[in-house]
Image (cartoon, helix red, strand yellow):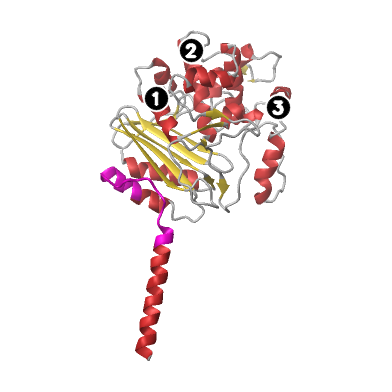
Amino acid sequence: MKKLLLIFAILACTSVWFAQTIQLKLSTDNKLENELDSLVEQSVSDFMKNSSRVGISIGIIKNGKSHLYNYGSIKREKSELPTGNTVYELASITKTFGSILLAKAVIDKKVNLNDDIRKYLKEDYPNLNYNGTPVTLLNLANLTSGLPNWMPDKDILGKADPDAIPYILDSVHSKYSRQDLYRDLHHVKLQVLPGTISRHCNTAAQLLGYIMEKVYNNSYENLLQIYFTDPLKMKNTYLLKPRKLPLNMATGYDGKGRIMPVIDWEDLQVAASIASSSSDMLKYMAFHLNERNAVAKLSHEPTFGKIEDGAIALNWKVKKTEKGSRSVSHTGGSLGFSSYMVFYPDLNSGIVLLSNQADQGTQSELIALADKILNL
């Protein structure tokens, strides 16, 4: 009798283990046909072991050849595998589109990188200088403007519960207009000399986009279409607007599995509100890998810091790998999405990773995942 009970116990444990194994097996379109497929499978499986992860789409260009992989789901509440056309928030990777417009304007001799930004603002802003040194277009693009990261430049969070912060940000910024930003810009007081300290700045990216609208005499939405989505055939790339989300967009979550608000705020459209897919971002990456294009090449030129330590180009981070190749990269993190793009122009290779989940560790884990897959 004891032996029979033992056999039943072993069978029960085996059944539970087998059921858990089936349940934990990731949904994917990876065909596991070659070495790269196997490396992606192992690497992404490790990344997705975190129970807060939902889905991920990956686009790779290796030695000039493109590859697409998808894992997980576009929604937590049901299993629906993402595709190469599934749309994710790019968050701060959005800033690189504005930098391309700036680089093109420089090549076309419409502007100079060292132009005082007040040359392109309608009102007078005598406050936008530090001891006589003005903020330039270059300062906006290489994160050295000294402007506050967010506008309005005041504490809107106070001692808020961390769980409430996404909703507070959404409630404030969904009502904060372009006119509000220009009004509050009059009250900014620079604390550092422009060009001396590099730090993340949404305000600078937004201003750069507004200035590009003036330079090109067109809306940013139209500029996105004219210079990116039409010529590069990026059919799944959008400038997000309130209550007008793309039908094929994934749902974004925080680390606790809560659905997060989308950054479709007017005051951050140019800084953080482009959404795209892995297939489209492969086309964008291919554009950047072609440095015979003077515009792409200029946007990758280091403008602050040393390339050995990690320099800043026009909204790109540029550094040398241990093997001596250049890497050009940018991360993105919204309330419910995380992204990372890195490419190596000298090797005609790169990777973009798009995830519909965001917590404090997701971006750094995407960087590690990219390094593990490409191993360049």
Q: Is residue 106 left or right of residue 38?
A: right
Determine the residue positioned at 42% across, 47% down.
71
Name the spot of residue 57 as percent of width and height, x first: 43, 41
Q: Are marks 1 and 2 in contact (CB under 8 Å)?
A: no
- Say whether residue 274 is magenta: no
Could you say which quadrant of the image residue 325 lies in?
Answer: top left
Q: CA distance from mark 1 to mark 2?
A: 17 Å
- Amino acid, disc 2: Val
Q: Could you tell me if residue 245 is visible in this image? A: yes
- Amino acid, disc 1: His
Name the spot of residue 253 as percent of width and height, x first: 57, 47
In primary-sequence order, the first of circles 3 and 1 is: 3
State the residue lying farthest toward the bottom.
1
Q: CA distance from mark 2 to mark 3?
A: 28 Å
Determine the residue positioned at 42% across, 17% down.
295
Q: Quadrant of the C terminus?
A: top left
Residue underneath mark 3? 177
- Amino acid, disc 3: Ser
| Element type where label 2 sits in the image | helix
Q: Are marks 3 and 1 in contact (CB under 8 Å)?
A: no
- Say whether residue 27 is magenta: yes
